[in-house]
Image: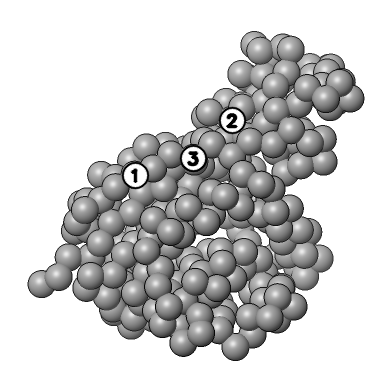
Amino acid sequence: MTEAMAFGRLSQWRNATDFSEATAREKAKQLELRARAEDETATREEYLHLLGLAPGERVLDVGCGSGVVTRAMAGRVAPEGRAVGIDTSPALVAVAREYADAAGFAGSVEFHEGDCRNLPFPDASFDAVIAATVLAHVPDAERALAEMVRVARQGGRVGVFDFDGDAFIIAHPDRVLTRRIVASYSDHATVNVGLTRRLPGLLTALGLVDVRVRGFMPLEREPGSFYAGLAERAAAGAAKMGDITSEEHASWTAALRAEYAAGSFLGGRPHIFAWGTRARS
């Protein structure tokens, strides 16, 4: 069994092409909720700074989702630059356009439908290319990385920001059951479980130079936060896949909600940003 078949059977993103409008809006709300968190905002500002975006550049956001990163990139390359977002989901692309218009970015962004493993852009089209929390959900992500390098100009930058699902932090009194839930969710909700740990080597093998890496650890404490919801989805996923019993699911979730009530919740996942420069010939 290939890794793409063995892992990620519960990934909510691997079949995004088929999202209905209602599903796309629900997923976009999740992405926007995560994006508003204080640690997420600071992290996004830092990795875009590391990517070296500058006014006047043409930049690409691969797997743009609701367009959070696309909008942030547009703000950095304005007024003469252009931020382009691409996503496999037509419904998400439509929602991303709505968010961009509402935020006043209609004149500095554009969105396209397409597969990150076969980007519909000419060679050397962009000054910078990024994929943020996307490739962990993409079967055969190495093809997407090669495409990102292809569409970057010589001297342009390519970066990948993604999470390590095996290290999901959840404050919970039952550490043994929590460990089982985290392992189950990492396997079943993520296609490329170990991608982040391989990124520096993969980017180097594709010919990028000056490849660097930086770690980030977004954390949240609020009951209604993105990571609180993700913890509950992780437990539900583990029960669905038979890795925990329904009784364990119920008792674990009740204890998690008690953590909320006591103000003791903490959740988050480590992220890695790896980036480099396309060599000049």
Look at the picture and state if 45 lies above or below 72: above
The answer to whether the residues at label 3 and label 1 have Cβ atoms under 8 Å apart is no
Q: Quadrant of residue 39?
A: top right
Side of 235 relative to 223 (left or right): left
Q: Nearer the viewer, mark 1 or mark 2?
A: 1
Q: Residue at x 67, y 76 (%)?
A: 100
Classify 248 as above or below 207.
above
Q: Which mark, residue 158?
A: none
* Residue 8 rendering spot, x and y as whole percentages: 56, 42
- Amino acid of disc 2: Phe
Residue positioned 61% across, 27% down in the render: 169
> Is 188 situated above or below 79?
above
Label 2, label 3: how far apart the Cα atoms are = 13 Å
Q: Quadrant of the C terminus?
A: bottom left
Foreground of the two, 45 or 86: 45
**Between 25 and 48, the one nearer to me in the picture:** 48
The secondary element bearing badge 2 is classed as: loop
Mark toward the start of the polypeptide (1 vs 2): 2
Q: Which residue is mark 2?
A: 168
Residue 216 - label: 3
What sort of colour scheme is used for the picture?
one colour
Q: Position of residue 235 (x, y in %)?
A: 73, 29
Quick one: label 1, few (<14), some, or many (20+) residues within 10 Å?
some
132 lies left or right of 157:
right
Q: Is residue 121 above or below residue 71?
A: below
Q: Which residue is mark 1?
A: 213
